[in-house]
Image: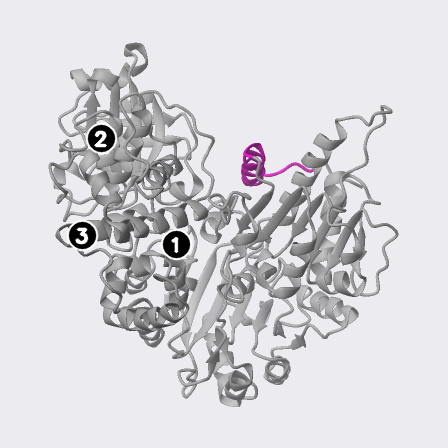
Amino acid sequence: PFFDLRPYGFQSEILEAIEAERREGIRRHLVIAATGTGKTMVAAFDYKRFAKVVQDVPEPDGTTPPRPTLLFLAHREEILKQSLASFRQVLRDRDFGDLLVGGARPTQERHLFASVQSWQSRGLDGLAPDHFDYVVLDEAHHAAANTYQAILAHVRPKVLLGLTATPERADGLDIRKDFGSDDPELAGRFTHELRLPDAIERRLLAPFHYFGVSDAPGVDFTNLTWRAGSYAASELDGVLGANDARAQWVRDQLVDLVADPARVRGLGFCVSQKHARFMAKKFTEWGIPSAALTADSPTEERNRVQGDLVNRRIRFIFTVDLYNEGVDIPEVDTVLLLRPTESLTVYLQQLGRGLRLHEDKPHLTVLDFIAPQHRNFRFADRFRALTRSVSERIDKQVEEGFPWLPSGCLIHLDRQSTQVVLDNIRETVGLRKPKVVQQLAQLRQRTDADGQPRPALQQMLDWLHLDDPDDLLRHGLPCRLLEAAGSPPLCAEVAPYERGLERGMRALALSDDRAVLEAMRRGIAGDAGGGVPGPNDRVGRVRLELAHSLLWGSERPGRGTLEEVHAFVVGAPGLREDLRQVVEMRLRGLRSLAAPEAIRGAGVLQLHAQYTREQILLALGKGSFAAPYTHREGVLHVAERKVDAFFVTIRKTEARFSPTTMYRDFAGTERIFHWESQSTTSPASPTGRRYIEHRRRGYTPLLFVRESHRLENGLTAPFWFLGPLQYLRHEGDRPMSMTWRLERTMPARVYRWAREVA
């Protein structure tokens, strides 16, 4: 029987984001969503929508067109079988599609669920490139592999949909390059993101209790060989594969930390097949019945062993890579991480195997065995992926016991594990400027030999093995770093303004208002620059002002007018080239915001974009670029525009807020915001009456929110523009405790920290 399936709310958000990109003419979509959140169902619902649009247009003879052709591409049979079943349910068609994997022989070529291996062995590259209208690439982080690239290079679908839990680089390449627009400035962006903490917060996945346990005495990976982004597997196996003492250590920690070991249903992720069989044998000998499964295990054996685990005939399945992706056993309540997992993608997939919701499972228990690692191993990435706070430095969160986890979750690292993790984070994150300059000198020698005038920003990042431009920009302007690395003078004229420009370039690299970035790009284009918009283009001029207000500190050329600072940039080729590359890189990586819309009273500000206080004041008409308006309070009355702007910092600290300004501001829901007025405001005061009666008086309250005063990288945090508010109610006096309704739903990634009560 078929069920009347409808997308959940969060799936509808993803589908709407895909549809918004289609309206922009984008046909290659990348959805990033945590393992276990139903990405395959999103693909099925979107295909159903796409098919309806196609079939609503009759053929010339009046008949209904057939469903669009479909290729669903994955690399495991289990994923393909589950996906085919999902599509049949959503389409309410038990005959839809065929498997093309293993020995399966499809009866048609219009709707195929195929493995990469079968694509190659069955000669499907002989089909016309446009044979498939709709192509789904599941677990899209494999897209950088040569086999996937060969398929992507061949097919030319009307829709390409990539699904992944993380956009982490694979094989040294960025998977996002295959998605987004054909326009280079819009290429490489993702459509929608639902990270693991958001999914847990929304009760889509189970909470976790995560124990970082110091590994057995003598286990140390510091000096193992590291090549191509991972440990040499044979050397890992030599340390762990048949280590009796280590296996006993794992058993002892399990007994100590798991509430009821006799009722555990767990997975243990091992380094090799030998290691998996060894662990299963040892646990069984110790009275903990277990089995080993690998990618080589026959289907019948897999099904039998999985049934044994579900029915508690065994306690653990030890595996290497079989359960990394695509296999669901919701009953799993314990995960043992028995090897150092270098890939963030694989780490999140392994964790995700136990995060499926199940009535018998209040939470997932994770035991992560932590040993000293090679200096290229990164603990920072994995723990950052588990926390809700994007602004707090991850080493500080480790020291403070991870205070910003999703509801119901905890992470506990024992003393030795804490030290190992902190040492690793501080070594891998703390690349020093002298080392940067030394390595850039080596890069410059290579590019000089190739006749290249100067290394590009992306080349510099790749050479230094950095993904985030800020990891380079925090050491200085690229042109100045290259000068320090031995290049001839590139931008010596910036010296008087260098400190402010360094911070400004970093801030510009984080800006998410596309129109502001494009204003700067146009302004510096060409040999003489695009110039400053004239008085007839007020919108263009304000956007360029917002871009330059980010770039410049308090020290500016001449009198600090827009014309003077812009002329300085255009006349400094090294600085202009830095700026051009930073802006273009940011535009390429920028995700889509909501379709631009005019927000009354907000000028050029874009809903759900982030702005500094100075940018907001400029956009609201306060002060000028050359003479910025000074304002540090939490409220701003702009009478000429009939606007009240509220500036809210959710996590207030006594160092920055006095006792009278430690207001209690937080999100009650994604549409409700609780806010306290200034301590002198009463309901009867002119200000209080204006807030309460804003609709009758034609006023628009605008909400700007940030998590904390500073970002993790040390820069002053910008404010998210959450749009207009509608008064609901109030209570109290001096301050007034007010409840507002947002006209637009706040983004999930803002809500996860805005809901914290200060």
Find the magenta span and give its range.
5-24
User: Viewer-proximal residue, 90 or 415?
Assistant: 90
The question of residue 10 being in magenta is answered with: yes
Give amino acid for label 2.
Leu
Q: Which mark is residue 488?
A: none
Give amino acid for label 1.
Leu
Residue 647, image x and y in percent? 24, 34
Q: Which residue is mark 3?
A: 494
Vertical relation: 294 (above or below) 583: below
Rendered residue at 67%/39% (across/down) = 45
Q: Which residue is mark 2?
A: 617
Q: Which residue is mark 1?
A: 405
Residue 274, image x and y in percent? 63, 84
Vertical relation: 342 (above or below) 720: below
Q: Residues within 10 Å of mark 3 (few under 14, many from 20)?
A: many
Query: Element under label 2?
Result: helix
